[in-house]
Image: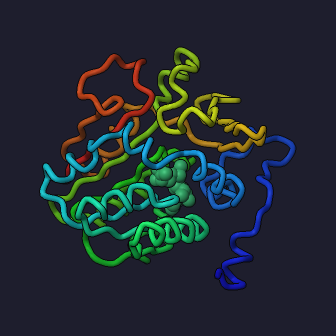
Amino acid sequence: MPSDTENSLLDYHPQQYGDDPTSIRDTNKYTDEYVRGFVEKWDELIDWDQRMESEGNFFIEELRKRGVRKVLDVATGTGFHSVRLIEAGFEVVSADGSPYMLAKAFENGRRRGHVLRTIQADWRWLNRDVTGRFDAVICLGNSFTHLFSDRDRRKALAEFYSALKHDGVLVIDQRNYDSILDHGFDSKHQYYYCGDQVSARPEHMDEGLARFCYQFPDGSTYHLNMFPLRKQYTIDLMRQVGFQRVDTYGDFQETYHEADPDFFVHVAEKC
Ligand code: SAM
């Protein structure tokens, strides 16, 4: 049974973007974008087995290849990757800035027989709340896109960098925003991450905002305002904060045509 505090934390309330939703370009907005209704519905429809099948063992293999044991999941969300990695034998600490997400992740973990080690931490001040050094930091599910200023992105990356051991690795994924900005949105790309029950499409795109609309089979709709990270910009930032080598995969493949992939995964090594 959730406590009174948990219940008030988990209260249903609508997303609020005001009269001019495209003017909301704020790093702090994420905490109230993931309202309970959105997250519950998302988790209900995105079958974890199906998601597991579409990404295969990509992350597990990348981590094993580098001898990783201790992983810090900085964008735990509802716990998909934390649970996957625990089940693959990694030691995982699960962080997120949203207490509601962490509560949901804990519940999902418990249902599968795991006790997640959760820490509420905003990336910009990560090392204030997370102690210890990790072999890998993962930031997956198009999460880094929630940071709206160059300064916040540099600050978060510097925090990820210092949470890593001297030979650690950072894994960040992102939607292929270059393709949407330069060529428009192609609906064949919409299902990789959300399954075929949820339609995810951009409602507004400019160089400073990707506002996506998520539509569920019962007709309910939710939105996310995100920053459309260009691929080369993300790579340059990682190099600038000190990562020595950055490999970028397109839909988990080493070779790809720039416009084709739905998602990019960056694997950045400290040395
Ligand atoms: N990784 C999960 C997945 O793939 O299902 C969750 C992805 S969800 C799109 C993004 C997550 O990043 C949310 O749980 C949100 O709370 C978290 N997040 C966004 N900005 C953050 C910040 N500045 N600090 C900490 N967590 C943040």
Vertical position of residue 36 compared to residue 53: above or below: below
Is residue 79 visible in the rendered structure shown here? Answer: yes
Which residue is pictured at 24% across the width and 64% down the height?
A: 90
Is residue 209 visible in the rendered structure shown here? Answer: no
Image position, residue 149 (x, y; %): 54, 48
Where, quadrant-wise, is the N terminus in this rendering?
Answer: bottom right
Vertical position of residue 72 compared to residue 4: above or below: above
Vertical position of residue 91 compared to residue 215: above or below: below
Image position, residue 89 (x, y; %): 23, 64
- Total marks placed: 0
- View extreme (right): residue: 19
Which residue is pictured at 24% across the width and 40% down the height?
A: 246
Vertical position of residue 43 compared to residue 10: above or below: above
Q: How is the image coloured?
A: rainbow
Q: Nearer the viewer, residue 203 or 69?
A: 69
Image position, residue 68 (x, y; %): 18, 59
Q: Nearer the viewer, residue 46 or 175?
A: 46
Decide if residue 19 is on the left or right side of residue 234.
right
Which residue is pictured at 24% across the width and 37% down the height?
A: 247
Image position, residue 87 (x, y; %): 30, 62
Which residue is pictured at 27% across the width and 42% down the height?
A: 58
Q: Nearer the viewer, residue 139 or 231?
A: 139
